[in-house]
Image (tube, rainbow, N blue to C red):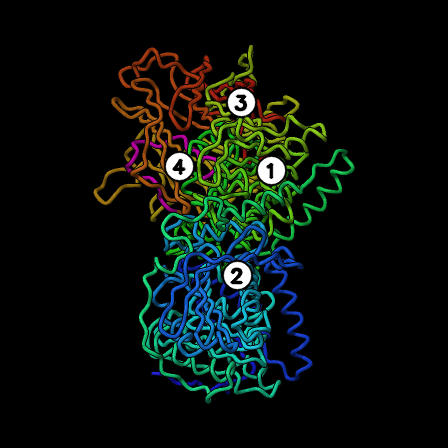
């Protein structure tokens, strides 16, 4: 069933998809919702022109933009080459027509395979011609569905030229029919800046050139039609080339914004189209010539009746401006995506009216016919095609080499500076995000969250390293989880770098469902970005740029960016354009955009249109980071094969020459993936390597006489505070010893981030905070209405939440903290910033003593020190969740003191090593009989639990320690009422003073 749809809709139309709030959008739909909203914003002011002069200005601007999007003169050479037509085999003589098998040259060395259907009547008198372009039928011009409309039109008196699109039919990579020319085959053209959609327009223009050479053709009466991808070709060629007097796109018209709801072939993509137009205006370019748009009721959304109506509502007024409203028709057919017999008959009638001047444009019955065997229509049957036949990837390689080799290397520093400035400006146009980036962010190790743009929510992990360690952003387009599973991630952690991993938009947990098409894992998401004029490479660089802003907030650390696989291109582009990045590495990354085969194991999103033309090859991008260190750690070919270092040398010659020209050849490193950390100048080393205490350092006595029973805490102004017999004792920076607060009854002491002293008070069974002017505030003295046992030691996480232990040493008859069974609890509690108290560890340990939260909030370390006979003397590690709770199942034993005295206070240096007070010099049987567990400071690896170093302390009991001194490399130790100190090689991790 066919019906003509009315074209009297509103002449002003905005396509605004209904989208949920960002927080309600599932992660796998976030990116799609973002691009849809971006597109709606870009086209919100679209309206039909009110006057012919207005349209003519709009038409001129649209043609200029399309010309640029398709590659300008690289796509449309000013001087066409000779057609050099060739006949292949004998023509097929059929009832009323003849089929010729021929090829002609569209560009130098590029031949288009075609079939020409010549009606017998045209040999006597020139006849109108129709260019038939196939869609994504596997047989291309040979397919029976495509043949049907060719034969039908020929028997009705039209000369018909049916051509194979570039990369399809007989023009595939192989000789067998059925190849798909989209995804990573068509993607080979993007770096050149000449997308397949533009090349198809030009090739179809050359097909018209050929038709004009035929004596059987009336040169002033040529039409074009095709369905699906062929309908798309029909729309663009018909809009661009005014020699087409009748244009009939079938099952292909909707609107660009509808493309953002589905997948489409790369042959249909016009990069950046949504920045300057919508589909209605492209259709308007056909006016006042004849245009019939056909849609099917059961087609996909991007070609649906409803979406087509939205476009045609704005196209119709254009035809009216030319007083040709009837030259635009919209025919709707019941059925699926097709070029069915009713559709063909409607096309025959419309072509007859506008090319022959016959009839009223209604359907013409299709004559009876039989289609040919596909093989019989081939110009090159079987495997007879010439070996040097120009395929689409071969053409991409040929043109890519010209572009690459045309990037001359300057011979002086001044020449390089000018050339680098121009190339960097070109790269910035490709990778710099438009608009404001002052969106939401939150950094609270071990997590980072940011909204680089409205509608995009990213999150990741920060593995905290040393105090002066560089920030290393490790990118992987398979997602942060993939990066975290790799050996490189582990090596970076060993180097004590601050390692940041997060999912870039559309990757990892944010990957679009069903994104992969063929060899392109990010097919749809990359394609949607291209429609917006924002290739994913640019969007990923935007995400990285915003993350760097967050990470550098108030911190001037060195910034290093490493990209694994295709993410290496993101790292190199970012390093070339962002001054904050001081080092960059690409690991197993594509070595060159230039290719004679489809990309394999690459990301479509990294192939920004025109990057090879405007900036250069991968090596030219790397060269723009002269002045920084760049490491190329391995590489891969376009086909995905690993390349050895000696194979990378010629590929990266432009970069190595640039670095050498500026005298920085040592900063450009070609190496293997295993040596990337070394290449960046980091030392990936186990925490136990190197001395921990300064060579020759000895324990120094600072104060005695019961002044230092517990809790050392250092402050640049006050000196060292300790919990002693008479209260809180003070050792001033000048060496004076005095009582700072009498009868304080404290144990563990710790300065918070505001320089206030937080105290565990076992005597009053409370935790308090003392201001710098001496004012004391009780933070908590009971839990669940019950008094604590004896608050002992404390630690503070990155969110300023306080964790404290609550053991009981001595008489136990008045213990009030118990579980529901009446068992006593000597656990760990958390005080939130709003004062709320929660128990985070109960009977998972026997008697919690020292506690420490790691710098990245990843772990909570608990010293379990039960000094009763048979009691636990163990250091445990628990995984700490973002909400401040622990995972009991994560409990891991790091060190066991056996039958000696167990662990007490715990501190950590900038490399993450744990300094644990424990042991006894004089055994204490029967509870602590061991003679080989000496008293002192045990330095322990936080991951493995290995004992890395030990320094003995002569007086029992060794209770706690703390870092201090101007360089934070003085370890203060409390033992037997005495305060000691010793120098370390690594600074300690402290909250105060702020660094």
The mark lying in front, picked from 4 and 2, is 2
Q: Residue furthest left?
A: 821
Give the residues in magenta: 838-858
The mark lying in front, picked from 4 and 3, is 4
The residue sitting at 48% across, 49% down in the picture is 391
Q: Quadrant of the N terminus?
A: bottom left
Q: Residues within 10 Å of mark 1 (few under 14, many from 20)?
A: many
* Res 909 visible: no
The residue at which mark 2 appears reads as 200
Q: Earlier in the sequence, mark 4 or mark 3?
A: 4
The answer to which of 205 and 41 lies nearer the viewer is 205
The answer to which of 253 and 720 lies nearer the viewer is 253
The residue at which mark 1 appears reads as 619
The residue at which mark 3 appears reads as 971
The residue at which mark 4 appears reads as 485
Tell me where residue 436 sits by quadrant: bottom right
Kindly indicate whether the residue at mark 1 contacts the one at mark 2 (C-beta within 8 angstroms): no
Residue 562 position, x and y percent, is: 53, 37
Residue 790 against residue 342 in the figure, above or below: above
- Distance CA(mark 4)–CA(mark 1): 29 Å
Look at the image and say whether residue 541 sits in the magenta stretch. Answer: no
* Res 669 visible: yes
Kindly indicate whether the residue at mark 3 contacts the one at mark 1 (C-beta within 8 angstroms): no
């Amino acid at each position: 069933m066919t019906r003509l749809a009315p074209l009297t809709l509103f002449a002003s139309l905005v396509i605004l998809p209904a989208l949920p709030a960002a927080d309600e959008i599932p992660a796998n739909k976030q990116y799609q919702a973002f691009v849809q909203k971006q597109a709606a914003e870009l086209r919100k002011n679209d309206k039909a022109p009110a006057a012919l002069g207005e349209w003519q200005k709009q038409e001129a601007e649209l043609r200029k933009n399309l010309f640029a999007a398709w590659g300008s003169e690289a796509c449309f050479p000013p001087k066409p080459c000779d057609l050099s037509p060739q006949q292949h085999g004998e023509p097929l003589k059929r009832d009323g027509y003849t089929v010729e098998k021929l090829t002609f040259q569209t560009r130098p060395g590029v031949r288009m395979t075609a079939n020409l259907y010549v009606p017998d009547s045209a040999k006597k008198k020139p006849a109108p011609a129709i260019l038939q372009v196939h869609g994504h039928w596997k047989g291309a011009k040979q397919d029976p569905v495509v043949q049907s409309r060719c034969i039908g039109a020929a028997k009705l008196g039209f000369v018909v030229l049916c051509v194979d699109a570039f990369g399809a039919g007989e023009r595939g990579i192989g000789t067998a029919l059925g190849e798909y020319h989209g995804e990573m085959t068509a993607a080979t053209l993007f770096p050149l800046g000449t997308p397949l959609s533009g090349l198809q327009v030009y090739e179809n223009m050359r097909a018209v050139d050929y038709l004009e050479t035929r004596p059987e053709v009336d040169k002033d009466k040529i039409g074009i039609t095709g369905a699906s991808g062929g309908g798309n070709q029909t729309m663009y060629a018909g809009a661009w080339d005014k020699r087409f007097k009748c244009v009939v796109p079938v099952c292909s018209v909707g609107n660009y914004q509808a493309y953002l709801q589905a997948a489409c072939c790369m042959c249909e993509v016009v990069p950046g189209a949504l920045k300057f137009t919508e589909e209605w205006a492209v259709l308007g370019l056909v006016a006042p010539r004849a245009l019939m748009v056909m849609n099917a009721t059961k087609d996909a959304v991007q070609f649906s009746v409803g979406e087509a109506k939205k476009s045609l509502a704005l196209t119709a007024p254009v035809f009216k401006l030319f007083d040709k409203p009837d030259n635009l028709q919209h025919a709707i057919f019941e059925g699926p995506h097709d070029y069915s017999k009713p559709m063909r008959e409607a096309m025959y009638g419309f072509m007859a009216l506008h090319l022959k001047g016959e009839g009223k444009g209604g359907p013409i019955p299709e004559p009876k016919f039989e289609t040919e065997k596909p093989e019989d229509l081939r110009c090159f049957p079987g495997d007879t095609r010439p070996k040097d036949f120009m395929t689409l990837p071969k053409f991409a390689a040929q043109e890519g080499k010209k572009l690459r080799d045309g990037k001359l290397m300057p011979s002086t520093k001044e020449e390089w500076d000018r050339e680098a400035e121009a190339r960097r400006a070109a790269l910035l146009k490709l990778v710099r995000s438009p608009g404001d980036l002052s969106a939401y962010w939150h950094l609270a190790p071990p997590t980072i969250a940011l909204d680089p743009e409205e509608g995009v929510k990213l999150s990741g992990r920060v593995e905290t390293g040393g105090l002066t360690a560089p920030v290393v952003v490790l990118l992987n387009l398979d997602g942060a989880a993939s990066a975290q599973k790799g050996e490189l991630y582990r090596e970076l952690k060993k180097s004590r770098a601050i390692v940041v991993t997060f999912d870039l938009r559309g990757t990892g947990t944010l990957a679009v469902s069903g994104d992969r098409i063929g060899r392109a894992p990010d097919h749809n998401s990359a394609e949607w970005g291209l429609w917006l004029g924002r290739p994913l490479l640019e969007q990923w660089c935007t995400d990285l740029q915003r993350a760097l802003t967050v990470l550098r907030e108030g911190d001037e650390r060195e910034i290093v960016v490493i990209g694994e696989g295709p993410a290496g291109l993101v790292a190199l582009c970012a390093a070339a354009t962002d001054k904050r990045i001081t080092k960059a590495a690409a690991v197993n990354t594509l070595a060159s955009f230039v290719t004679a085969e489809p990309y394999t194991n690459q990301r479509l999103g990294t192939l920004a249109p025109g990057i090879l033309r405007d900036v250069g090859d991968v090596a030219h991008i790397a060269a723009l980071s002269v002045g920084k260190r760049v490491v190329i750690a391995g590489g891969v070919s376009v086909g995905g094969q690993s390349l050895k270092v000696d194979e990378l040398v010629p590929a990266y010659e432009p970069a190595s020459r640039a670095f050498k020209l500026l005298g920085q050849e040592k900063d450009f490193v070609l190496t293997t993936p295993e040596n990337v950390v070394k290449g960046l100048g980091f030392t990936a080393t186990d925490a136990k390597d190197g001395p921990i205490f300064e060579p020759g350092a000895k324990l120094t006595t600072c104060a005695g006489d019961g002044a230092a029973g517990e809790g050392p805490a250092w402050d640049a102004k006050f000196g060292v505070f300790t919990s002693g017999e008479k209260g809180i004792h003070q050792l001033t920076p000048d060496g004076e010893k005095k009582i700072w607060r009498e009868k304080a009854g404290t144990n563990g002491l710790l300065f918070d981030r505001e320089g206030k002293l937080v105290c565990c008070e076992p005597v009053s069974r409370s935790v308090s905070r003392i201001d710098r002017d001496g004012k004391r505030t009780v933070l908590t003295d009971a839990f669940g209405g019950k008094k604590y046992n004896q608050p002992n030691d404390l630690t503070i996480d990155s969110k300023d939440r306080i964790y404290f232990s609550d053991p009981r040493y001595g008489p136990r008859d008045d213990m009030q903290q118990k579980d529901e069974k009446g068992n006593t609890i000597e656990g760990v509690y958390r005080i939130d910033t709003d004062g709320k108290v929660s128990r985070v560890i109960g009977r998972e340990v026997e008697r919690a003593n020292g506690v420490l939260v790691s710098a990245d909030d990843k772990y909570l370390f608990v010293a379990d020190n039960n000094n009763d006979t048979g009691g636990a003397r163990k250091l445990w590690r628990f995984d700490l969740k973002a909400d401040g709770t622990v995972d009991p199942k994560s409990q891991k034993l790091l060190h066991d003191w056996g039958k000696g005295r167990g662990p007490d206070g715990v501190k950590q240096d900038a490399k993450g090593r744990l300094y644990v007070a424990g042991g006894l010099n004089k055994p204490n049987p029967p509870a602590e009989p061991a003679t080989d567990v000496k008293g002192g400071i045990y330095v322990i690896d936080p991951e493995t639990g290995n004992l890395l170093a030990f320094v003995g302390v002569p007086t029992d009991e060794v209770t706690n320690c703390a870092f201090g001194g101007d360089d934070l490399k003085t370890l203060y130790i409390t033992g037997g009422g005495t305060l000691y100190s010793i120098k370390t090689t690594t600074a300690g991790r402290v909250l105060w003073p702020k660094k």
